């Protein structure tokens, strides 16, 4: 029940295309869903986050779509750029808890010029 | 003006040795974490302190001992290092979710530990 499943494991997209990464969770008590971006040799950096009271959140080219009934959420990167090439992690956490994040397995994105 | 810093960045040591990793945050956050990232890039929580109090202690060998001298610092000491301890260890901090309703976590640059 604590797992967060992420797919695909790797993704290759052409410059200008849309990158889509999906995550699914089991624990309905989760109510905070962030996405992190990690470049090689660096720590994960918070990209965008959503709570289940909204179905979509957009920040620039990055959008989270959230489907509470399906217990799924996804990251869409519009107009993907070579600089977006990185590993992306979804995560989930529960309010009133310790802030403990459960991470997905990660998706390595390569955007080809 | 680094937000979350870790030292050292690289650590190469032999099996059986004892080593420490240090973490400092200047964000004024109450909560700090240690994560382990394995060779497949999977991130897993190890420990968390809130204002010097241990609040998360995952199933981690007791060779790993965290210490928080104050809320801006969280160190990780590892005794009797084993080959399987080789990984990247990340420190993170957050404002203190259960107290302030904010859960975003900010990660340090990581410490790559190699045990030979």
Image (cartoon, coloured by chain):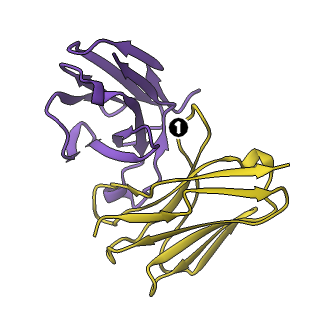
Q: Chain A drawn in what color?
A: yellow
Q: Which residue is mark 1?
A: A43
Is residue A38 in view from this perspective? yes
Left or right of A64 in this view: B11: left
Query: Would you call the spot at circle 1 few (<14 residues within 10 Å), some (14-19), or many (20 or more)?
Result: many
Front in this rendered view, residue A30 or A1: A1
Residue B59: x percent and y percent? 18, 45
Q: Looking at the picture, how far across and down is residue A43, in whole percent?
A: 53, 37
Q: Which chain is purple?
A: B
- Going 35% across and 43% down the picture, which residue do you hit? B30
Q: Nearer the viewer, residue B67 or A26?
A: A26
Q: Is residue B8 visible?
A: no
The relative height of residue A39 versus residue A88 in the rendered view (above or below) is: above
Estimate the x, y position of residue A25 in percent, counting from the top left: 40, 71
For the point 41% across and 46% down, which residue is it?
B43
Could you tell me which residue is drawn at 45 percent across and 72 percent down? A24
User: Residue A65's image quarter?
Assistant: bottom right
For the N terminus of chain B, the image quarter is: top right
Measured from the top left, where is residue B57 in percent x and y?
20, 45
**How many badges with numbers are in the image?**
1
Q: Is residue B28 above or below residue B114?
A: below
Q: Nearer the viewer, residue B84 or A62?
A: B84
State the residue lying farthest toward the left.
Answer: B62
Picture quarter with the C terminus of chain B: top left
Callout 1 secondary element:
loop
To which chain does the residue with label 1 belong? Answer: A
Q: Is residue B92 above or below residue A21?
A: above
């Amino acid at each position: 029940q604590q797992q967060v499943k992420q797919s695909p494991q790797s993704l290759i997209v052409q410059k200008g295309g849309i990158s889509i990464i999906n995550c699914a969770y089991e624990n309905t008590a989760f109510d905070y869903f962030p996405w992190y971006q990690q470049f090689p040799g660096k720590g994960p950096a918070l990209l965008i986050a959503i709570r289940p009271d909204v179905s979509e959140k957009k920040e620039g080219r990055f959008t989270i779509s959230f489907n509470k009934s399906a217990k799924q959420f996804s990251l869409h990167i519009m107009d993907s750029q070579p600089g977006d090439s990185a590993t992306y992690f979804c995560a989930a956490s529960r309010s009133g808890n310790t802030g403990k994040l459960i991470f997905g397995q990660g998706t390595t994105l390569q955007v080809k010029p | 003006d680094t937000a979350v810093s870790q030292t050292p960045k690289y650590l190469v040591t032999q099996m059986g040795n004892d080593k420490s990793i240090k973490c400092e945050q200047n964000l004024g956050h109450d909560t700090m974490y240690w994560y382990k990232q394995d060779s497949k890039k999977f991130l897993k929580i190890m420990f968390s302190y809130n204002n010097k109090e241990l609040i998360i202690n995952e199933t981690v060998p007791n060779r790993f001992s965290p210490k928080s001298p104050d809320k801006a610092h969280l160190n990780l000491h590892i005794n009797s290092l084993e080959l399987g301890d080789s990984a990247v260890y990340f420190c993170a901090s957050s404002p203190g979710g259960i107290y302030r309703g904010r859960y975003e976590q900010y990660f340090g640059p990581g410490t790559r530990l190699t045990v030979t």
